[in-house]
Image (cartoon, rainbow, N blue to C red):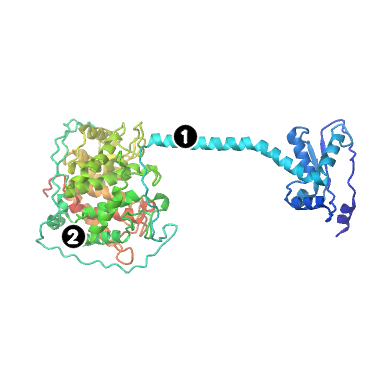
Amino acid sequence: MNENESANNEQPKPKSTPVAANPVNPAAVIIVTNQPKRKKNSGSKKTKLNSSYEPQNLFSDETAIFLLRLIKGKDKLPQKIVFPKKLRQPKTVSENISKTIFDANSKTIPETVQEEQQQYLQPEKQRDVQEELAAAIREILLPWVWSFLFHVCLFIFLAILFFQKSSKDSFTIILGIDEVPVNFVRDFPLGLESSEAEVSTIIVPQELPPVEMPKAVPLKVETVIESEPVHATENSPEIPTGFSLSSREIGSRANILGKGGGSSQTDESVIAALRWLVRVQMPNGSWSLSGPYRDAAPRTRDNRNAATAMALLAFQGYGVTPDAKHPQLIEFSKSVRTGWDWLFLQQNSEDGCFFREGLAHYEQRFYTHGLCTIALCERLAMTQDQTLREPAQRAIDYCLKHQSIEGGWRYRADRFRSGSDVSVTGWIVLALRSGEAAGLSVPPEIYRNIMKYLDSVSRNNGSQYIYREQEPEFRISMTAEALLCRELLGWKRNDQRLEQGIRILIKPEHQPTFDEHYKRDAYYWFYATQTLHHFGGEPWKIWNNRMRELLVQHQEKQGSNAGSWNPNLPVQDKWGTHYGRLYTTCLLTYILEVYYRNSGIYTMTD
């Protein structure tokens, strides 16, 4: 023990401390001194009580008295606190400092304060002052705590009430992460140690047995669209009747494949892609944008409903149904069956919507619902299974109910029905036309409103299109998507606006490439391929010759991801980093299925 500590221990406690009065500033001052250590008496019961309690005290007794008097309103906060230079460590301050209140106009401690301090500093009173301080603090804090809890509960109740009003979707218990331990990428790279996939050569016979799948005969639609095209004076054309799925039948597919510009290499690529989808299917039958495979989407962008619909569309584009028995299709039928078993559970039993709140970002609502509706209507058209008619019509009705006042669709489904963009609208148009191909009903005014909306976002006399009305410049992807909608909704093949738009799509700077970032865009290629395929002729030949060679060339041939396309190599796809390998693979598979995916809208004579 050093001399200073010895001096502190031997220093007697002062009865009063003289303070010089300050005539200029009569403010109260706190003088902080070292608290003398108490002597322990192991033989006293009072000391035993004190020693067992003393280590639990948060404040010294003098500080507790000060705080207690402050809470009771007997004293006011001092203007200045003086600490001795020896006591600057927080631990030392909390253990040894005593605070004493002085009267501003007095040189000594008031006698009432001295008497109260001496009373509480007696051993039998030391516990009382701490307990009394704690009770006083509780008395102050308790109303604030109850008020805080009440307002939190009120906020939660109002939030639940608000969301119940904005969405009437029912809740379905859905399994989250499946039982398979999967490291999701991009943040968690994964290498699946499976054997290298072998892609077998497909020999297409000239004569094939009849197909068990009934034909999906196109519906004779007599609806007339009274559109108001930009700078157009012609009468509104009829909805084309050539949109059907009968070309997917294996018995006619070989002939259509060659005439449409496909080859055995493109067919092999499709089968390899479907086998990859089988390998990455989840145990519960669904698919995921975020794994299990390399170069997947971030988990924050995962959307099981949309991913499952995209995978099912790839299988159905090849003619696979849940009950397919043909030797070329049977290896995929189980995956399609389990995928549909899972996806049917996701549809809302009341309004028919396939989007689930909280399981995906709100902007994906109508993308998700559009994809699921297309898949459901295609299955109905391919199988003529009448048990699918009611859920398919409910899915169509959900689209009709939420058409915006502008005539299109966007992200939200609210009572204001405001907001449209070409991207979302294109998927809904595909859903509606698929529904009509399956025999479902769509009121004529729906198409009239769509045509008016497309007029509002058109540029250059209707040959180019922007994303939304607020945008000044056209987008090539939105131009391809809007022109496909025009084809599906009645523009003639010799329409000058369509011909001009087709010439824009096949310009060298807009043709497919894997060499430049932001020019690799599977989304744009998907819509441009369909638009040009329906149009036919020389523009289709130019596009198809380049597209099919690039896709076959850049499809992965070995390893666990054989059959898929890497969204990041050799350059990043425009949206590949957002939605990953499955999104990219499905869109490129649709492109290679285009030869037989849908019958051409126009009669191709050249």
Q: Of the residues tagged 2 and 1, which is closer to the observer?
A: 1
Query: Image point 63% across, 37% down: which residue?
Result: 142
Tell me, for residue 353, which label it has, or none. none
x then y, percent, for residue 139: 67, 36
Q: Mark 2 or 1 closer to N-term?
A: 1
Image position of 470 (left or right of 487): right
* Residue of label 1: 158
Q: Nearer the viewer, residue 226 or 306?
A: 306
Query: Image point 76% across, 43% down: which residue?
Result: 128
Image position of 81 (left or right of 517): right
x then y, percent, for residue 522: 30, 52
- C-alpha gap between disc 2 and disc 1: 60 Å
Image position of 163 (left or right of 598): right
Say which amino acid is labelled 2: Ser
The quadrant in which the N terminus is found is bottom right
Tell me, for residue 263, which label it has, or none. 2
Q: Quadrant of residue 322?
A: bottom left
